[in-house]
Amino acid sequence: MTISYNWLKEYIDIPETAEEIGGVLTATGLEVESVEEHETIKGGLKGLVIGQVITCTKHPNADKLSITTVDVGGDRLLPIVCGAPNVAAGQKVVVALSGTTVYPSKGEPFTIKNAKIRGEQSEGMICAEDEIGLGESHAGIIVLHTDVTNGTPAAEFFNIQSDYIIEIGLTPNRADAASHIGVARDIKASKKRKIKLPSVDAFAVDQKSLSIPVEVENTEACPRYSAVTLSGVTVSDSPEWLKNRLLSIGLTPINNIVDITNFVCHELGQPLHAFDADQITGGNVIVKTLPAGTKFTTLDNKERTLLPTDLMICNAAEGMCIAGVFGGAKSGINTNSKNIFLESACFSPDYIRKSSLHHGLKTDASFRFERGTDPAITVYALKRAALLIKEIAGGHIASEIIDVYPAPIKNRNIEIKDRNVNRLIGKTIPREEVFGILERLDIQIVEKKDDRYTVSVPPYRVDVTQEADVVEEILRIYGFNNIELSNTARTDFLAEFPIKDIDKFKRSLGELLISNGFYEIWTNSLTNIAYQQKHNLNFSGEPVEILNKLSEEQGILRQTLLFTGLEVCAYNINRKQKDVKVFEFGKIYYKSDGQYQEENQLALYLTGNVETENWRHKTQPVGYYELAQHVHHIILKSGLSIVKQESLNDPLFDYGARLLRGKEEIGKLGKVKPALLKDFGIKQELFYAELNTSLLFHAANPKLVIQEVAKFPEVRRDLSLVLDKQVSFEEIRSLVLSTEKRLIKSIIAFDVYEGSTIPAGKKAYALGFTLLDETKTLTDEEIEKVMERLMNAFEQKLGALIRK
């Protein structure tokens, strides 16, 4: 949001520089992103003065040039060669002195230098308006009709003002600060100064010649609607002061009526809209929604299709404006408008946000309405705008104020406990100082007790709804920098008991995956319930349905990350990126026993080939074991010591495994069913894993253990055995480790075979065992005893046939 420093000073005394006031605002929570100088004319006419042509003669060596002598003040007479046809003795002119850089309306800036032109000395330049950025004309030099003293700076004569533009990164909750007076309120609270609000005491009805009744059918979408009419106005360009105000904050002046509505919007934070009253068919205004599919042409001459939730400002025959968002093509102000209907309303943020998003229209009005405006200020803003219109555009106030406000919005009363203020802030602030801060924030103390008090919060503070919000207001004005840190918070406690940070944990896992060729994705938490209904899928708890959903495709909060991730995979595959390797940290949501629940999840997606086709290796499609390897790396990174695997029976997967730590399921992985992939247009195999990030984090114990490299050699022994097909490698591994814990350091399966050379229902494993005694070198006898125990265990407990 853009704030003009000079404009801001109209409402509050500011002795500080623009940079200093930027620091004040940042300290109160309005983060200032930049402070930049702004000039109404580029260069600010620096180095240009008002002079007088004393003599003017023809140049002896050029027919179209003149030799002049110009008085530029201070008893200085400068010889200047001029090519303008209208130069003459006695004229008051604008002179660029030698060394001045001028900024023309078109082209690059250039610097004036002393020079000889056709043999005659020239020490400056008499300027045309386009040469110094004051206009577009190059027909001749600027001739002034003035008695100002020669040498007067041109910037002073033309009232060129230097300003500073303060760019604020306004957070969505601070709608109250979306105006110059809103920003001034924070300075008032922080610096204990008074605000100077523009007076509207002069407002009076001149005549009652233009009465336009207003009916509000949808009071939920429009709690308050205020309006007034003016007659006999003259629509033309705005005065320079008004243009400069708007230009300073990046707005383009249009005409005096529209410019005044924009000015008041940025002054008070209350959007206004002006209608041509003669274009209001039937002479009445109705605030309502229109049937879905209704066509409406907006000011940009685009035809738009309305939603049933689009609030419209209508006349007796049709819509005139999408309320709080954008005006219509037929009812806007133009140079022929004489009578106007001026609107100032309070609209529901929910309705405005939906309309703005649906139609892709982001305007200054929608920016404020969708965050929440002050319902108490509509009439004041109307009076302010009406008085400015009378002053600038003439005309008469032609009706009483129309104010439809069936259910006035009251202040919110919130009880505050002293102990909660001190606990949340981390410091005891004297009560009287707290009360002073709250009163400067327009939050009134309505009841005081020994250990608590009740405050009354005005409606324009849409973000202050509970006790913690009030404490935050106290803290940001008191000053975050005024809260001392305790010694224990930064020494022994932090060193002895480091805080476990789930964000750091997730970042470390993300870095691991990225280093293994994954890309991170972010997907929408809203998804289509049809994905799970089509396949009769049931997840933990009930789905959380969105009440005011924009579409059925985004009707529920997701209960699995799979569907939104498949949309990403399909998007890439459809664009010939068939090798997809992505992950996402996200949340799933559900309702259980009447309570809303959410869980942090990590999802991995693998499809396509293991690596890009190249001359050294044949392409090979990814499989379950590539995914399992990445999941294994994540578990190792987390420092989990014991993770058990079980075969997975899940309607999402053809096959897969569950990962358990004790009785808690940490995650699952497997090959996604082709029927599910078909819904997304995916024709290739895809492997998916989901891990519960919170369980991983809380169970993690990533301790760094350092030990010596073994002094004695490892020994490798291989073994081939035939087992029932349903026996998993996890069962084999568990049996090996329970049979020989001390000497077996690792076990791998380097081949698995199923085929005609072994009985049906069987499979053959080729296993490799690594043995190590850290105290001595193993003998052949010791190794054979270990292998004998393993073979006996395989035969007795797994029914294995040992292939020797």
Image: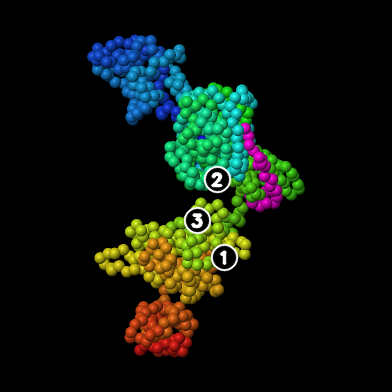
The 10 Å Cα crowd at callout 2, few under 14, some 14 to 19, many 20 or more, is some
Look at discs 1 and 3 and give the one toward the viewer: 3
Look at discs 2 and 3 and give the one toward the viewer: 3
Look at discs 1 and 2 and give the one toward the viewer: 2
Whole-angstrom CA distance, mark 2 to mark 3, is 18 Å
Residue 208 occupies which quadrant of the picture?
Answer: top right
Q: Kindly identify which numbered label has been placed on residue 351.
A: 2
Closer to the camera, 212 or 610?
212
Q: Secondary structure at mark 2?
A: helix
Is the residue 466 above or below the residue 140 in the image?
Answer: below
Closer to the camera, 228 or 518?
228
Percent coordinates x, y for residue 152 in the rendering? 44, 18
Percent coordinates x, y for residue 101 in the rendering? 36, 26
Closer to the camera, 315 or 563?
315
Residue 87 occupies which quadrant of the picture?
Answer: top left
**Residue beneath label 1, please?**
541
Q: Which residues are magenta?
A: 402-428
Whole-angstrom CA distance, mark 1 to mark 2, is 31 Å
Going from N to C along the chain, the mark reached first, 1 or 3, is: 1
Going from N to C along the chain, the mark reached first, 1 or 2, is: 2
The 10 Å Cα crowd at callout 3, few under 14, some 14 to 19, many 20 or more, is few
The 10 Å Cα crowd at callout 1, few under 14, some 14 to 19, many 20 or more, is some
Q: Going 71% across and 46% down the picture, which residue do you hit? A: 454
Residue 356 visible in the current orientation? yes
Q: Kindly identify which numbered label has been placed on residue 670.
A: none
Q: Going 43% across and 57% down the picture, which residue do you hit? A: 521
**Residue beneath label 3, please?**
552
